[in-house]
Image: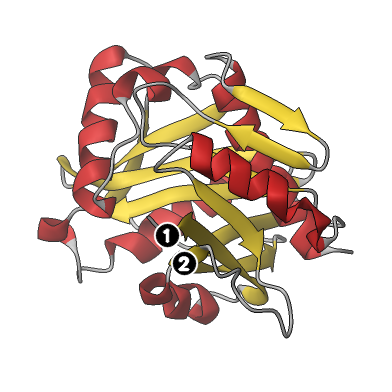
Amino acid sequence: MNCTALNLKNLTTLWRLASEAYQGYGQSEPVHRAHIPNSAWPNKVWVDLEASEDHMDQVLAELESHPGWVYSRVKPQNSTIPRQLQLASEQTGMSLGLSSPFPHSSRVTLEAVTTEDQAALWSQAFEDSFGYQIPDWVVFQIRNWAHSYLVMTEGELAGTVMHFKTGEVSGIHCLGIIPAKRRLGIAREAMHLILNKALESGSKWAMLQASEKAKELYLQMGFLYDFTWQNLRRID
């Protein structure tokens, strides 16, 4: 099984469906672009996994036409970054086979976002956790298929997480804990809860893209490294 391909299908399908709701998705094979007006997310350009480097002129043209967007790719082996681009961020693509429920306590709970007020709370907590915003109106718009949750601890808001399913894969996205609630073990418990939801949905795999800070937690939980994911920005 190609975990990299399944992970990327989940991630790029999320971008595509979210941007399609705002007429912001387009493609000119093998290049795809996803954009939501007045939003910092997703604003991405990517290419089909099997595409060759011949697409780079298209990618550079898209980035020149849309300042602030990034080109997202699996880091190739023995490949350099094109001279017109610079590394904006790097993540680790990871996967975990699902078989039995994970332990959890009642200290942490997940509250599904179903109202506009909850979407506003989620959006603010996400910004506090990650430093950029997914607008509340986007979170509310996609709530029926990209399921967002408020991470709660003892009645207080602690963070965010999102669950998006494609086939037998549950993509775990946007797991973030606000600064005031960090280093309390909340992220691990929230992950256990969202993985149990993935199991209940019938998924056989959980997949995510981890920051450098979060990677060690996921490795401890049994996730395996699959690939390195790069976001590249055009040099001004």
**The quarter of the displayed image where residue 34 is located:** top right
Q: At numbered mark 2, what does the secondary structure look like: helix, strand or loop? A: strand
Q: Residue at x 24, y 43 (%)?
A: 127
- Asked whether, in this view, residue 28 is left or right of residue 235, the answer is right
Q: What whole-number distance in Å separates the C-alpha atoms at marks 1 and 2?
A: 6 Å
Q: Residue at x 65, y 76 (%)?
A: 224
**Which of the numbered marks, if any, corresponds to residue 86?**
2
Q: On the image, numbered disc 1 is attached to which residue?
A: 235
Three-letter amino acid code of the residue under disc 2: Gln
Residue 16 location (% of width, % of height): 64, 30
Q: Is residue 162 above or below residue 95?
A: above
Q: At numbered mark 1, what does the secondary structure look like: helix, strand or loop? A: loop
- Depth check: 78 or 194 in front? 78
Q: Residue at x 72, y 74 (%)?
A: 76
Pick the quarter of the image with the N terminus: bottom right
Residue 36 location (% of width, % of height): 46, 24
- Report the number of numbered marks: 2
- Asked whether, in this view, residue 1 is left or right of residue 83, the answer is right
- Asked whether, in this view, residue 206 is left or right of residue 69, the answer is right
Pick the quarter of the image with the C terminus: bottom left
Residue furthest out toward the left: 180
- Decide: marks 1, 2 in contact (CB < 8 A)? yes
**The quarter of the displayed image where residue 19 is located:** top right
Three-letter amino acid code of the residue under disc 1: Ile
Residue 92 location (% of width, % of height): 56, 70
Residue 77 location (% of width, % of height): 74, 81
